[in-house]
Every structure is written in structure tokens, then in C-alpha cells.
Image (spheres, rainbow, N blue to C red):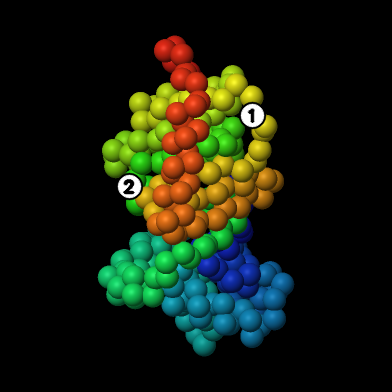
Amino acid sequence: MNVEKTLENLGFSPNEIKVYLTLNDHGSCKAGKIAKLAKIDRSSCYNSLKSLMEKGLASYVCIGKVKWFQATGPKRLLDYLKEQEEEVEAILPELHARHKAAKVEGQVRLFKGIKGMKTIFLDMARTGADNFVFGSEGQFSKVMPEFALQFDRMKKEKNMHTKMIISKGRMEKDDNTTDYRYFPETTESPAVTNIYGDKIAILIWTDEPEGIIIENKAAAKAYKSYFEFMWKHAEKIKTEKVKK
């Protein structure tokens, strides 16, 4: 795993990453040496050191009149993330209230990349409603295998059920929470439609996947009726177990 990329995903600035990794690699250093090793100017180095110390990820000791900076143990990162999580949890009630008040019927949200796709599936899990799917060609399990297993566990915990229409010959995992039917002839497409609660999620599994969530009760009802029509005319999967 790329350390720099992970730290960037955690919200660290490029200079913070350079300074933090320099401290980890070289131990106690004076600010001038840190700036030189990190290849940044002294002013940026001091700003990054200040930010890291505020996060509890760096400290210093004075030897004479000189400050020697050092990184705290790497496990401090976990404590820092936990503190952030606690701060977010503290404001969640107010955020939920404000989000609910500002909610607009018919809103459309766009998500990009693997993280965006995770957000969509987590929204399905939070909703806890049964899911009706067509267009799937196994992209979810192929692109995000570990998260797909996690999503299956969440479905079981929420007692969620899925009805999925797939193309003939497709092999799917029978996880006891999904019923499958198929159409003999379908055109392969990267787009997969999920209907759950009052929402429709359309996932497009291209090289950089993206998806949209349409939150509209009337639209979801119409899509559900369309799905039920297809389900009624689709062929049932034989009794033998299917697998990935």
C-alpha cells in the first residue's frame, strides 16, 4: 500500500506528508535539516511542523536554544483518527437535523471512483430496504471483492433481500439473501440499476466507475413496476447452486 497516498486520503497536505515521513525516516532533526531533507522551504516546514504537533503526530525537545523535532509513534495515527471519529459523532445529530430539513424531493447525487461506489452501497445498507437489481454482470464482486463480501454481511445483519435479473450463463454467489432470474439473450452493459426504498442507484462500471443516486418516490415506484414486469417474464434459475 502506498503510504503517501494513504496519508493524503486521510487529509494530510503534501508538505505535512513530506515532513512527517522525514521525521519517521530520520528521527530527531532540526527544522533546517527537515526542510532540506523534505525538499521544501523553511517557512513551509515550520507550518507543517506546527500542524503535525497540533495533531499530536510530532513533538520537540529543546537542547540549549535549539529545537529538535521528532515524530510520535506511528500508532498515534490511529488515536488521531479515533479522535476525529468522536468529533464527527458529536456533531452527527445536528448534521442529521439540518440535512433532513434541507432535503429536496427528486435530488440527484453523483459519485465517482471506488470510494464513490462504496458510498452508494453503504447508503443501500443504511436504508435497509430490499434491493431490486438488473444489468449486473458481476462487476461489483470483480472490482471490489473484499467490500462485496462485507456488503453481503451487512445485508444479512439488516435482513435485506435482493432480487437480481442476470444474463443466462452468469455465475453468481448464492448467499441466501438473493433470488436470481435470467433472460436468455441480453446485451452486456457496464450499467447496473439498483432500486431500493425511494431511491434508484445507477452504477456504471467503467475503468473509473461512477454512479448516481436518484431520490424520488414516484420514480422509484415506476422503476420497481418495470422491474417486476421483467421479473415476471424472466426465467427462474435451476435448483442447482450457483457460485462466483
In x, y percent, where is residue 187?
67, 32
Checking the image for residue 128, the label placed there is 2
Residue 241 on image: x %, y %: 44, 15
Residue 83 seen from this side = no
**Kind of residue indicated by mark 1:** Thr
Q: Residue at x 44, y 51 (%)?
A: 220
Q: As displayed, is residue 192 above or below residue 13?
A: above
Question: Outermost residue, top direction?
Answer: 240
Q: Residue at image x 54%, y 22%?
A: 171
Q: State which quadrant residue 41 falls in.
A: bottom right
**Residue highlighted by disc 1:** 186
Write the residue at 34% across / 75% down.
Answer: 101
Local secondary structure at mark 1: loop
- The amino acid pointed to by label 2 is Gly
Q: Residue furthest bottom?
A: 65
Q: Earlier in the sequence, mark 1 or mark 2?
A: 2
**Vertically, is 31 above or below 231?**
below
